[in-house]
Image (spheres, rainbow, N blue to C red):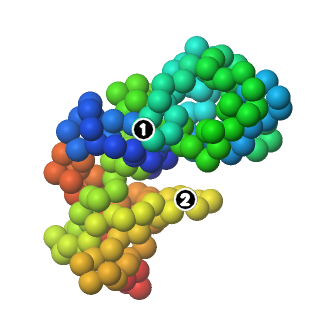
């Protein structure tokens, strides 16, 4: 089965590929941690192992570059320290800010794997070429992701992302072909 990787897009300006975002969300700063300028970050990435000391991330809007100088795991996410902050008070200004990486710096995926932002907005058609709508959301469930497909009238169809239902994904054409079983719609 193909894999879908979490991602959230930020802005289309300066994107490495036309129509793709320039930045991808990898986390959200929750609060300062301790007194030396550390922050607790909620991880919103399938690749948390890439968030390491020496890596430059972009924080807030507009996205400001911040170099990570320290990283520790925490039960609720990661504790990060940025070079530019030395006190809890100064780093407190980053509370609730999103943390981004450049889209052109994202890891390459295996053939048949996609980031969420690549699938959102794609047109979903049945094998008989009937248009069902566009993917507006991807729900992450325990078994597999579920595409939320909404038509122009606002009606939604939920398509499980598995080989039983998704027969083709064509990013270049902007379409996904699905196999519909009785009762699904």
Query: Whole-percent x and y of residue 72?
Result: 75, 26
Query: Whole-percent x and y of residue 92?
Result: 69, 38
| Residue at left offset 40%, top offset 30% | 102
| Residue at left offset 26%, top offset 72% | 133
| Residue at left offset 48%, top offset 25% | 65
Please tell me which residue lies in front, 181 or 16: 16
| Residue at left offset 28%, top offset 52% | 169
Residue 23 is labelled as none
* In this rendering, position of residue 30 left or right of residue 1: right
Query: Whole-percent x and y of residue 77?
Result: 71, 40
- In this view of the protein, can residue 151 be seen by the observer? yes
Query: Whole-percent x and y of residue 53?
Result: 63, 17
Q: Please tell me whether residue 179 is drawn above or below residue 114 in the rendered image.
A: below
Residue at numbered disc 2: 140
Q: Please tell me whether residue 89 is drawn above or below residue 126 in the rendered image.
A: above
| Residue extending furthest toward the top | 54
Residue 62 is labelled as 1
- Please tell me how crowded label 2 is: few (under 14), some (14-19), or many (20+) other residues with Cα within 10 Å: few
- Identify the secondary structure beneath mark 1: loop
* In this rendering, position of residue 80 left or right of residue 185: right
Q: Quadrant of the C terminus?
A: bottom left
Residue 154 location, quadrant: bottom left
Please tell me which residue lies in front, 96 or 165: 96
Residue 91 location, quadrant: top right
**How many numbered marks does the figure carry?**
2
- Please tell me how crowded label 1 is: few (under 14), some (14-19), or many (20+) other residues with Cα within 10 Å: few
Please tell me which residue lies in front, 147 or 21: 21
Please tell me which residue lies in front, 78 or 146: 78
- Identify the secondary structure beneath mark 2: strand
- In this view of the protein, can residue 20 be seen by the observer? no
Q: Sequence-wise, which precedes: disc 1 or disc 2?
A: 1
């Amino acid at each position: 089965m193909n894999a879908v990787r979490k991602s959230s897009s930020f802005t289309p300006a300066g994107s490495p590929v036309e129509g793709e975002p320039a930045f991808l969300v990898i986390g959200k700063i929750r609060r300062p941690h301790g007194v030396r300028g550390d922050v607790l970050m909620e991880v919103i990435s399938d690749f948390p192992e890439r968030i390491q000391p020496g890596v430059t991330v972009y924080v807030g809007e507009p996205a400001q570059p911040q170099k990570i100088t320290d990283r520790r795991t925490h039960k609720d996410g990661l504790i990060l320290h940025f070079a530019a902050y030395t006190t809890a008070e100064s780093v407190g200004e980053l509370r609730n800010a999103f943390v981004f990486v450049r889209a052109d710096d994202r890891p390459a995926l295996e053939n048949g794997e996609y980031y969420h932002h690549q699938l959102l907005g794609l047109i979903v058609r049945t094998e008989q070429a009937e248009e069902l709508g566009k993917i507006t959301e991807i729900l992450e469930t325990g078994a597999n992701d579920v595409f939320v497909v909404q038509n122009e009238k606002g009606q939604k169809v939920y398509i499980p992302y598995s080989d039983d239902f998704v027969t083709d994904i064509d990013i270049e054409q902007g379409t996904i072909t699905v196999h519909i079983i009785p009762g699904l719609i």
